[in-house]
Image: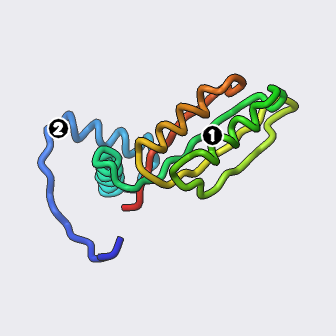
Amino acid sequence: MKDKQIVRFSVSLPLELLKKLDEKTLQKGYSSRSEVVRDMIRELIVEEKWEKKEEVIGVLVIMYDHHKHGLTEKMLEVEHANPSQILCTTHVHLDHETCLETIIIKGKPEEIEATSVKIGGLNGVKFAKLVKTAPI
């Protein structure tokens, strides 16, 4: 955040909605209502950037069977053919046959989503989830 000045403002809510906000504050371990509201605003900004097709960041989390013949090569082919920028990958061996990988991708939302679908749909991928984020 460029401007670190904190501004107080008030919000009017129906009592039941306020109770739900307080429940979420406790459940999620937030220190205050303000922290919850700040996170909700940030989430809306990220969603808007994805909708407006601005440059964004995606974190693709995948679990796959590393014994599946040719899978690693196919994943690398998709990554190298990706018009977006692969910033980083991490690779963890979970057990004898399962690997967990994160792929951090920077680019246009449609390119990131297409890469996510291509990799997630490969035979041998057990789980794939794209987490959407963006610089705020």
Residue 113, x across and y down, in percent: 47, 38
Q: How is the image coloured?
A: rainbow
Q: Residue at x 30, y 53 (%)?
A: 45
Left or right side of 67 for 104? left
Q: Residue at x 76, y 37 (%)?
A: 72
Residue 106 higher or lower than 22, as above or below: below
Q: Position of residue 109 (x, y in %)?
A: 41, 45
Observer-nearest of 22 and 88: 88
Residue where numbered disc 2 is placed? 15
Q: Secondary structure at mark 1?
A: helix
Q: Quadrant of residue 87?
A: bottom right
Give yes or no for contact between labels 1 and 2 (Cβ–Cβ under 8 Å): no
Q: Is residue 39 left or right of residue 96?
A: left
Q: Nearer the viewer, residue 17 or 86?
A: 86
1 or 2: tag closer to the N-terminus = 2
Q: Residue at x 14, y 58 (%)?
A: 10
The answer to which of 21 and 91 lies nearer the viewer is: 91
Residue drawn at the location 34% of the way across and 54% of the way down:
54
Q: Quadrant of the N terminus?
A: bottom left
Quadrant housing the C terminus: bottom left
Numbered badge on residue 78: 1
* Residue 125 drawn at (x, y percent): 68, 27
Name above or below for residue 95 compared with residue 108. Answer: above
